[in-house]
Each structure stands twice: as structure tokens, then as C-alpha cells.
Amino acid sequence: MTRTTRRTRTPLIAAAAAMFAAAAALLPLPSAQAAAASGCTVDYTLNQWAGGYTADVKITNLGPAVNGWTLKWTYGADEHITSAWNATVTQSGKAVTATDVGWNASIATGGTASFGFQGTWSIADPIPANFSLNGTGCNGAPNPTASDTVKPTTPPPTTPPTSPTPTPSKTTAPPTTPPPTTPQPQTGCGTAAAVCSGFEDQTGSSPSGDWQIITPDCQGSGTATIDTSVAHSGSRSLRINGQAGYCNHVFVGTTRNVSSVGPVFYARLWVRHTTALPAAHVAAITMADSNDGGRDLRFGGQNSAMQWNRQSDDSTLPEQSPAGVAQSAPLPTNTWNCLRFEIDTTKQSMRTYLNDSEVPGLHVDGVPTHDIDSQWLSRSTAPRPTTFRLGWESYGGGDDTLWYDDVAVGSQPLSC
């Protein structure tokens, strides 16, 4: 559901200002950071699902211009922020502090600054009411907008909202048509592929041999089988009956050694599924990353679009702002889709292709791009995948049935 509320503090009345004018003249002038606005409003828009949420926050400055801002508030339940965009957000217990990131430090009188974040909750997720900007409270009577009602969670807009224009070193999205790659992608699997499987060697209904079922930490109702009625090519595919809830996850991992694939880790697979990606976070491919303590590098979706996610710090690619999500794409249902990606193990560089078109929001090249990989590049070390698993894992709501076929992993580019 989506809820928005506004908190307002009116300026000091003129009479009170006059009473203290003489005394104020004797005090030193505050710094730009401390010169908080004499009034402000905060619009907090919540997009919530079971166990998780994102929030978009807009600050409107009703007082003097500020150059450098800090917004503070206190949560009323057990919300925990895991990642943020367009602000540096820290949390200590229930107390939260958000500060500007440089390019959006200045807010003119009547101007605005916006940022967002993602988090988890288990008991409740109420909208906070006690915001302060640079030490001055924004605690007047709430002024709800028309969207301050309970609504079903909806996908983010396809056209991103207007926001302050940052000035990073790269401001345009990468081209949707990739430049020529040398060597050219190989058809099929190629002779040097570490993994090349259409599951045609599977003789039973349960994965075996080069593929083994994995249920990390706990096991529930998710299942993995070899399906002889649906296939992209040949007569077999891997079927995943994915169920909502972390412990209902199931994966099938290759037993082949992929730890030496590189320096670029190339993967290609065909995937088909029945249910559109949900608003909640889900994962369909996981790879243990030896450069991140063995924690998983995960490919899946959130807010109805594809995304990459790091288990260690919950960073996402793209950032889960509406503008960031709009740079990704949904995974079409009830049809076979060719998914390809390449991960450079020597530097922060990743590219992802859906049916031979590069997805701009899933592009990393080491130069921060606003709403896409600025958060992702907070970690400078490149991933080093050592495992490769196909399946389904849901961190909130979201059942799905998926089929995987014609899977390849190797050190050379692979084509559809």
C-alpha cells in the first residue's frame, strides 16, 4: 500500500521575533549547515509489502536558503533501513539521520530536495511524525495529501518524476545497443564453457549429477524438478515451483567448477515464468562471491522490474527510486526469454541483456550514474562468483513457477 503524509511547522510570528531581536543581535551568526529553515514540510510516501518497504521523502524549505542539510526522525516500531539513494542515511536504534550527498546540498527558499530508501519491518511500519531539518522541527499539524489513504501497492511509473539534476561525471544512461565485443559471442555453449546444459542428461524427475538441489539455512514448500513437458529446446528443462517466504526457497546449483571462469564471467540462459515480478524483493539466480566473504550476488526483481542485489549490504542495481526502477525492465511472462550477463572479476563492470537488448538500469562501468549504480559502487571490489544456482527465493510475498533451459557459463561471450 502507498501512504503519504505531510508535517508542517509555521514560521515564528512577527511579534515574538520582535521581542527577541535585540538579544539575537548579540549572538554569533550560525554556520550554513546550522542555519536551518524557519519552517519546512516533509512528504513521506510509503510503498509497503509484507516484511519490506521503500519510502520516498521530499523536503520543502519554507525558510532561508540552506547549503547543507540533515533531516532526522525517529521510527515508532521496528523498521530497519537497509539501503538509500540521493542521501546518506544512517540508523541507530529507532533514530534515523539523512544527510545530503553534495550535489543536492542547497535548498532555496521554497525549494525541495528528495531522496529515498529501502528497509524491512516485522511488527509494524507506521509513518514517522517527528522530522527536524538542521535541528529545527517540522512538527506542526499533519496536512495529508490526497494519497494519504490505503491503496494496493502499484508498480513505479514508467516515466520518472522530475528531480534535482545531479552533476556526477556521467549523467546519461548507457546505450541500449551494446558496442561490438571482441571476441564475438559464441553460438550454443562454445568449446570452453564451464557449464553447458539443456538438462537432456537428466534421467529422473529430481535434478542429479551436474545439478543438485540446495536449500540454504532452511527448507519449506518450494520444489525443483526436471520437466519433460516444457522445454526451450530438446525435451527437458528445470522447473522451479517457487513459494513466498524465505524458508520456502529452493535452488539447483551446478556441481561444475566456475571459480576459475574469467577474467570476465559470462552467463546465458533461457527462462520462462508465469507470474509478473512482484513489488517485494525476489531472487532467481544466486552466486557465492569469494570477494565478499562468500555472501551471495543475486539476480531477481523488485518493484516489478529486474534487479541485481548484494546480500552483504543489500545494495541494489538499479537504485530503487522510481527513476532508477524505470531504467530496468520487467521479465515477460509466459514466453521464453534469453537472459545474458557479464561480470568483470577485475573491476566493477557488469552488463545485463534481455533478449539481446542491454538493460540500462543493470549497467555498471565504474563511473557512478545517478539512480542506477551510485549505491552499487559504494563497494569498490569486483565480484568473483564461485557458484551458480538457479531457483526462487522470496523475501516477502511472491509465488512463481519458472523453467530454466539451455544454460551456459564460460570465459567467452555467449549469444542467444
Image (cartoon, grey):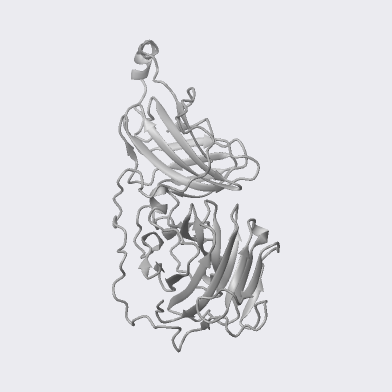
Q: Quadrant of residue 174?
A: bottom left
Percent x, y of residue 414:
41, 79
Q: Residue at x 31, y 31 (%)?
A: 65
Tell me if residue 402 comes above or below residue 104 in the rendering: below
Tell me if residue 43 comes above or below residue 168 in the rendering: above
- Closer-to-camera residue (65/357): 357
- Closer-to-camera residue (308/157): 157
From this viewpoint, which residue is outermost toward the front? 229
Tell me if residue 215 comes above or below residue 394 in the rendering: below
Residue 294 visible in rendering: no
Left or right of 291, for residue 352: left
The C terminus is located in which quarter?
Answer: bottom left
Q: Quadrant of residue 18?
A: top left
From this viewpoint, which residue is outermost toward the bottom? 191
- Closer-to-camera residue (118/207): 207
Percent x, y of residue 125:
59, 39
